[in-house]
Image (spheres, helix red, strand yellow):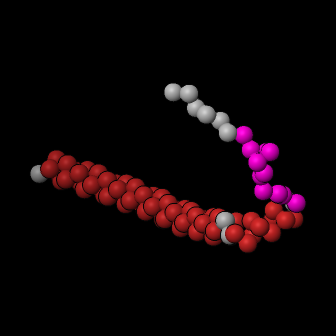
Amino acid sequence: MNKLNIVLFVLAVLSALAVVSVQDSSRESFISLEKEHQRRADLEEEYRRLQWQQAKLANHGFIKAAAEQQQLQPPTMQNTKVVRLQY
């Protein structure tokens, strides 16, 4: 009977250690998951900012103002060269 009590005690201790180990692993996984959720939110925010910036830069008025500021002129027939592709 004494050996049975010792075996049961060892099994109970091993079971308790396994529970602690699984809880620690679960906590680490949850922390990692929360970090990834935060990273995803940051990336979504950056994506929205980049979309807004792209829309701003693609605005016709903005492009026209930048072209005037840099004194750009539309291409003329003298500046245009037609290239034919040979198949």
Examine the rendered structure and indicate whether residue 86 appears above or below residue 61.
Answer: above
The percent coordinates of residue 42 (x first, y second) are 58, 65
SS majority, magenta: loop
Instruction: Specify whether residue 83 is painted magenta.
Output: no
Residue under the point 49% across and 65% down: 37
The part of the chain drawn in magenta is 71-81
Residue 60 falls in image quadrant: bottom right
Tell me the residue at 58%/32% (across/down): 85
Quarter assignment of residue 79: top right
Identify the residue at horizontal 11%, vertical 51% (top origin).
1
Dividing the picture into quarters, in which one does residue 30 lie? bottom left
Residue 33 rendering spot, x and y as whole percentages = 45, 61
Q: From the top left corner, tell me how far across and down residue 68 is, in percent.
A: 84, 65
- Image height of 47 relative to 25, above or below: below
Q: Residue furthest top?
A: 87
Q: Residue furthest bottom?
A: 61
Q: Nearer the viewer, residue 23 or 73?
A: 73
Left or right of residue 25: residue 86 = right
* Side of 50 relative to 63 (left or right): left
Can you see residue 64? yes
Asked whether residue 24 appears in the rendered view, the answer is no
Count up the numbered dots. Answer: 0
Give the side of residue 24 with respect to residue 3, left or right: right
Q: In the visual, does 5 lie left or right of 61? A: left
Name the one closer to the observer, 64 or 56. 64
Is residue 76 inside the magenta stretch? Answer: yes
Which of the two residues, 28 or 57, is positioned nearer the viewer here?
57
- What residue is shown at x 70% (from left), y 65% (from top)? 57
Foreground: 50 or 75? Answer: 75
